[in-house]
Image (cartoon, grey):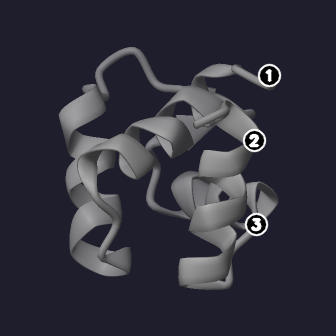
Amino acid sequence: MSFQAYLDNIRAKTGKTTADFQAIAEEKRFTENGQIKKEIKATQITDWLKDEYGLGHGHAMAVYAFLKGKRE
């Protein structure tokens, strides 16, 4: 499955866009100025996505990768 397909599936499941996740991550203080803070571990973000949105590990990692800067 392509990266974009992961993101499309996440939007279909949650109703949230990548921009929505960026904004929520900022509100939760996982990110600052669009960058993941150095003290934040991937597990903190993936656990949040799994708990709040019911995402599986692969889909949670796709959001994490997007937050880290992956776009393709």
Residue found at x 63% / y 60%: 21
Instruction: Find numbered disc 3 in the image and state the secondary structure of the residue it sits on.
Output: loop
In the rendered image, the quadrant that contains the N terminus is: top right
The image shows residue 46, relative to residue 40, as above or below, that is below
Q: Are marks 2 and 1 in contact (CB under 8 Å)?
A: yes
Q: Earlier in the sequence, mark 3 or mark 2?
A: 2
The picture places residue 61, in percent across and down from the top left corner, at 40, 37
Q: Secondary structure at mark 2?
A: helix
Q: Position of residue 64 (x, y in %)?
A: 48, 36
On the picture, is 1 further left or further right than 60?
right
What x and y, as percent, mark residue 40? 31, 28
Q: CA distance from mark 3 to mark 2?
A: 12 Å
> Which residue is under mark 1?
72
Identify the secondary structure beneath mark 1.
Answer: loop
- Residue flagged by tag 1: what amino acid is it? Glu
Q: Nearer the viewer, mark 1 or mark 3?
A: 1
Determine which residue is flagged by label 3: 17
Q: Which quadrant of the rendered structure holds the C terminus?
A: top right
Which one is in front, 66 or 24? 66
User: Which amino acid, mark 2?
Assistant: Gln
Labelled disc at residue 37: none
Q: Is residue 13 above or below residue 18?
A: below
Please name whichever residue, 72 or 17, is drawn nearer the observer in this view of the structure: 72
| Pointer 2 local density, CA inside 10 Å: few below 14, some 14–19, many at least 20 | few
Left or right placement of residue 10 versus residue 58 in this view: right
Which of disc 1 and disc 2 is earlier in sequence? 2
Q: Residue at x 34, y 65 (%)?
A: 55
Q: Quadrant of residue 65?
A: top right
Q: Which residue is pictured at 66% across the width and 79% down the height?
A: 12
